[in-house]
Structures are given as C-alpha cells and as structure tokens.
Amino acid sequence: MDKIALITGITGQDGSYLSELLLQNGYTVHGVVRRTSNLLRSRIDHLRRDQEIYGRRLFLHYGDLADGTTLRRIFSDVQPTEVYHLAGQSHVGLSFEIPESTCEEAGMATLRLLEIMRDQPRPVKFYHASSSEIFGNAVETPQTENTPMLPTSPYGCAKAFATQLARVYRQSYGLFVCNGILYNHESPRRGENFVTRKIARAAARIARGLDHELTLGGLESRRDWGYAPDYVQAMWMMLQHKTPDDYIVATGQDHSVRDFVEAAFAVVDLPWKKFVKHDSSFDRPIEPARLVGSAEKIRTLGWKPTKSFEELVREMVEAELKQLPN
C-alpha cells in the first residue's frame, strides 16, 4: 500500500524535520499551509527547490484549521494513510495574550480533524502533538503517561482538552490515534520568539560584536530539553506500532534557563554574566512545576535521544554563527 502522509504545521520546526524523515522513508508527503504562511516557509525551502521532490513526492495545500470544509476536501483529495497534526500556536507565554485563538487552534481544530477521521472510507493513523504543558503543576516528577493533567496556561489547557479528546475518539470509535506528549525540543530551526533560539542568537551576535546584551525573564525556570530531529523520529515510530497509544518523549533530565545561557556563552568563550540582563515583564504569570518526562514507554519501541544538552546548545549557537559575517 502507498505510504501517504498529511502534515498540518509542515512549515514549522517539527514539520520540516518530519517531512525530511518521511521522504527518506519512501512516503509521499502532503502539507497543509495557510496563505499567510508564504513568508514563513524557509524551513522547507530546500525541499521545495528540489525538482526531484517538489510536485512529485511533496505537495502543499492551502487550508486553515478553522475551515472544516477545506480540510475535508484535502482529506478527500490526498487520502492519507497517516496524519500528523502538528499545527497551532505553540508559544506558551503568548497564549496568555491570545488565549482564545490558542484554544481554537490547539483544541477545536483537533476535534475537527478527529471528526473528519471518523468519516474516512479506509483506516487512517493519526498523530496528535500533545505537550508536557498539560501537566503544569505536576503532582509527581518525573511525569508518566498516567500523571494527572494540571495545566497552568491557556496553551496547556487547550492541549489537555485535545489530548483527552484523542483518547476518547480512540476508545469510543476504535480510531488509530496516538498522543505524543513531547517535552521541549529544540534545534537551529526553532522559532525566533522561543527563549532557546533567542539565547543562541544573542550569544552569536554578541561574539561578533553585533549586539551587547541579552534581556531575559527568570533564569531559574527548568525544562527537559531534547533535540527536535530525535522527537519527530518518535512521532513516526508511534504510528508504526501495531496498536495506538500515548507516549511521553523526553530526555529525563532538566536544565534551567541559566544552564542554557551558560552553555551558549561557553561555545563562544564569553562570560555570560557580563551581558545578560533581567526584565520581569518576560516572566510568566504562572510557572509550571518541575516538568521532567519519563520516556520508558517510548524506549520500548526502540527510541532514544541521540544528542546531549551541551551538544544541542552548541549546534544551535554554531548555526547562528554561520549566518553572521565574520
């Protein structure tokens, strides 16, 4: 049977790495893009320029997660065997400023897609991008797939709603639906409004004499940070398993923002304390508890992380340096 994947959020960090992985594995890949994302397709530009791939094994379709009619038409045209639902506003801090659209994109859009899945003439495997933010004020550390959801942000609430919906549709209708509960995962393709990319870029620019300081919120926030290409591998592995289930994808180790700053400035051999300033306006209204994931379950499928925290930070800083004049 042909392997046909449909990806929402194909222009994002995870969508671009997932596209590469699926193409390597012999898939035909279809992506849903908004017309307004014309300027934001840099992460898949190398694939679109490849005449052997674009228009032959990679196709883009205009659509919007709020437009059920268009989504149904895309499903009908593409007839995917696997769907990877990655799209949506994923910046936690921003979700406090635009809570309604965040909940629409992360919550209701997932429901819309699950309903379309129910109506497909042949079985489709569905991956839903959940998040460690569903745990929020976690009652235990590390968190497992059975840890209660206690989100502390509009984004976390929307993801908790969508995650539970996915479980309901799996149990009630027998759909092949997996929740990937991914902890923070970074790469040089991370969005510029995320703190990790902001730190990596600042370290590089300060080293080149282009900037002179980096302004951040609290440095003590801790996260379980992994490497994005490893995490899209986990997404694919979930859908290849014979039965659908939920999996945490994490490193099992947490680091503070301070650790990330120290590691980034160490790459360029600069004393970070000289350049980093604190601005309380960047602090979150509520900071989650210690979010660290137990990936024991996904490891039974053969998955494991390939990059250490220090290697990840180094790759991000070095990628920024390459884009700057010497």
Image (cartoon, rainbow, N blue to C red):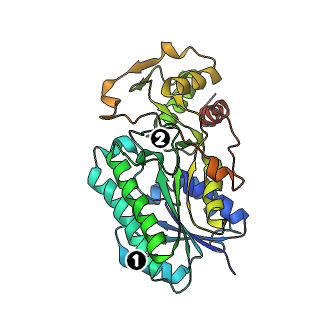
Q: Is residue 62 visible?
A: no
Residue at figure coordinates x 59%, y 16% from the top left: 270
Residue under label 2, please give it: 192
Rendered-image quadrant of the C terminus? top right
- The image quadrant of residue 47 is bottom right
The secondary element bearing badge 2 is classed as: loop
Could you say where residue 137 lies in the image, as x and y percent from the top left?
A: 38, 38
| Vertical position of residue 31 compared to residue 201: above or below | below
The secondary element bearing badge 1 is classed as: helix
Residue at figure coordinates x 45%, y 79% from the top left: 118
Could you say where residue 60 lies in the image, as x and y percent from the top left?
A: 53, 70
Which sits in the foreground, 149 or 254?
149
Residue at figure coordinates x 40%, y 25% from the top left: 218
- The image quadrant of residue 208 is top right
Residue 281 horizontal side relative to residue 225, left or right: left
Rendered-image quadrant of the N terminus? bottom right
Q: Is residue 307 visible?
A: yes
Question: How busy is the neighbourhood of tag 2: few (under 14 within 10 Å), some, or many (20 plus)?
Answer: few
Say what amino acid the circle numbered 1 marks: Thr
Could you say where residue 250 lies in the image, as x and y percent from the top left?
A: 58, 44
Tell me the number on the disc at residue 115.
none
How many badges with numbers are in the image?
Answer: 2
Tell me the number on the disc at residue 70.
1
Question: How busy is the neighbourhood of tag 1: few (under 14 within 10 Å), some, or many (20 plus)?
Answer: some
Mark-to-mark CA distance, 1 and 2: 30 Å
